[in-house]
Structure formats: structure tokens, C-alpha cells
Amino acid sequence: MCYDEHNTKKIFELVDFKIMDHNKAFDRGIGGLTTSRSGNNLFMYFESNYFQTDNKKLSLTGTGIRALDKNALEVIVDINNKQVLQSPDNQIILDDISNDCLVFKHPLDGLAFDMGLIDGEGNEYSTNSQGYSSGDDGHSIFFYLPEGKKIVSPLTLTITSYPTIIEHPFEIKNFRISTYIIIMVIPFFTKSNFYVIIPKKK
């Protein structure tokens, strides 16, 4: 699926996206891989011997999207005073700073950051790693700062995934699998188009 680069929102995922044959839903995943991203492209993987037969009329369904306005993707953190100065909806909390690790908390699962960061002087760095954990009090994201660097507060991080869900059920009926490449252009309510591409069978 390819999102229009002029879309005002950054779309992270289609919620409950399924390929349906009447009441039968096909499971996502090929060898454990369910989703991958590249730029404005989102790849969702389905595997079934059922797809090897021509002229199957299916439906594509979903219940909404996870997305943020593109001007709300930055999180600014004051590491000296241990507080978040800017976030999309004040749900992100800087819970701790320990051993060059920023520990963020969010009540919902689904927050992730880009590996890069910008410090208060405009210097660009990359994190060594990120980690995640969940508990009764919320979901934690561990963002490790580069070792041996004199990083100046505040820091700017970029969100690559966020749990905000915009509910808007949709269904595309009579989606047909054939030996040809199928490209479906689907207008979405966020003024975006996405394309569903099924490659030719070998």
C-alpha cells in the first residue's frame, strides 16, 4: 500500500485489516513477518494456498487507521529537568533517565521512535538501541542515548508509530485475484490514497 505523500496525516497502520472470503478471514503473516514499511509504502503479508486459484472474489476490510498529523510527530524532551516539553497529546511521560537511557511511558501500546535524534544545538545522533516493556501501569519505551557524546538539552525525537486510532470502518468488495498485477486505488477519508498490489503468480 502506498500513501499519498501530500496526505496531512502520517498513517502508521490500518486497524484490523483483513482479506475476507464471505465470513472467512485470512491470517496475516509469512514466516512470522506481518508488516514492513519503506517511506510511504506499507507492506502487509498474507499467505494461503487459496490465493493460487484465479478469479477469487474477496473483500478488503478494516475498522480504521492509526495516524497522527504530520506536524505532531516530534517529541521534545528536556533531559535536565526530566520533562516532556512537546508531544502529540500529553500522554507521553518521561518516567526516568538512568545510565543514558530515556524511559518513556504511555498508557497504550504502540509508541515507537525513529532511531535518530537532534539535540538542542542541532547536532544529529543515532540511538544505540530501543526497548519495550508492558505492565499494569502502562507501556514503557527505552531510548538509549549514544555513549560518550556531549548531548545538549532539549532533545527532539520523531515518532514512527503511535497508538491513536481513528475509527472509520471500510470495505472494498469484489476484490479479484488473477494472474495479473492488480492495483486498487482506494480514496481514504484522510485525503489519502493507498494501493493494494498483488504480484503475478510465477
Image (cartoon, rainbow, N blue to C red):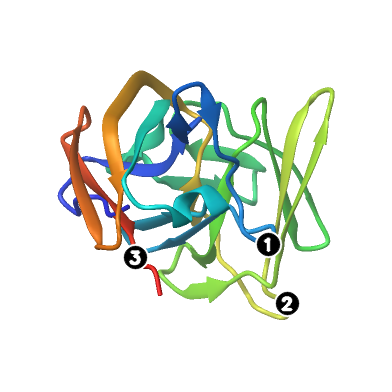
The local crowd at label 3, few if under 14, some if 14 to 19, many if 20 or more residues have their Cα within 10 Å, is: few
Residue at 46% x, 57% y is: 52
> Looking at the picture, does residue 117 appear above or below residue 140?
below
Disc number at residue 199? 3
Label 1 sits on what residue type? Gly
Label 2 sits on what residue type? Glu
Disc number at residue 147? 2
Identify residue for label 1: 31
Does label 2 or label 3 sit earlier along the sequence? 2
Query: Horizontal and vertical percent for residue 163?
Result: 53, 32
Label 3 sits on what residue type? Pro
State the CA–CA distance, disc 2 to disc 3.
44 Å
The local crowd at label 1, few if under 14, some if 14 to 19, many if 20 or more residues have their Cα within 10 Å, is: few
State the CA–CA distance, disc 1 to disc 3.
18 Å
Q: Quadrant of the C terminus?
A: bottom left
Residue at 45% x, 31% y is: 20
> SS of the residue at dot 2?
loop
Does label 1 or label 2 sit earlier along the sequence? 1
